[in-house]
Image (spheres, rainbow, N blue to C red):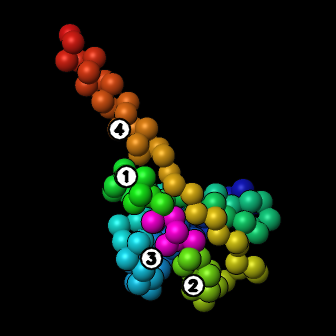
Amino acid sequence: MKHRIGRVEQEVQREVNDILLKKVRDPRVTGVTITGVDLTGDLQHAKVYYSILSNKAHDVEKAQAGLDKASGLIRKELAARIKIYKIPELEFLQDDSVRYGEHIDELIRQMNAKN
């Protein structure tokens, strides 16, 4: 069952990225990239992780508002594209791993500069 959930997560990630590029016209979600999806075991809820190029809190809030507003459209499009019993409820969360990686890189650069 775990293998199936992984395949569905990948498919949802691919399709949501495509829907954001081609169907969602909201300028607030421009530049948003879906970085991962976590589905519950019953496929009822999905946490969709996203990142944006800007680190400004205002841009993150705008992107979150745009994604929340478009979630119904995205879910409807997913229903047309993916053939599963029930399309999961989508919850959009910002992926902090990119920022964390940049922070680690900066710390390594600082250590190397001292040596």
When asked about the image quadrant of residue 86, the answer is bottom right
State how far apart marks 1 and 3 are (Cα). Answer: 21 Å
Q: Residue at x 57, y 57 (%)?
A: 93
Residue visible at 37% across and 50% down in the picture: 55
Q: Which residue is mark 3?
A: 20
Alpha carbon separation for disc pair 2 and 1: 26 Å
Q: What span is colored magenta in the figure?
A: 62-68
Secondary structure under the numbered disc 4 in the rendered image: helix
Inter-mark Cα distance, 3 to 4: 25 Å
Q: Nearer the viewer, mark 2 or mark 1?
A: 1
Q: Determine which residue is flagged by label 1.
A: 56
**Tag 1 secondary structure:** loop
98 or 69, nearer to the observer: 69
Q: Which residue is mark 2?
A: 73
> Which residue type does callout 1 highlight?
Lys
- Quadrant, the N terminus: bottom right
Res. 11 in view: no
Residue at (63, 60) in percent of width and height: 47
The residue carrying mark 4 is 102
Q: Earlier in the sequence, mark 2 or mark 3?
A: 3
Query: Can residue 106 be seen at all in this image of the molecule?
Result: yes
Q: Earlier in the sequence, mark 1 or mark 3?
A: 3
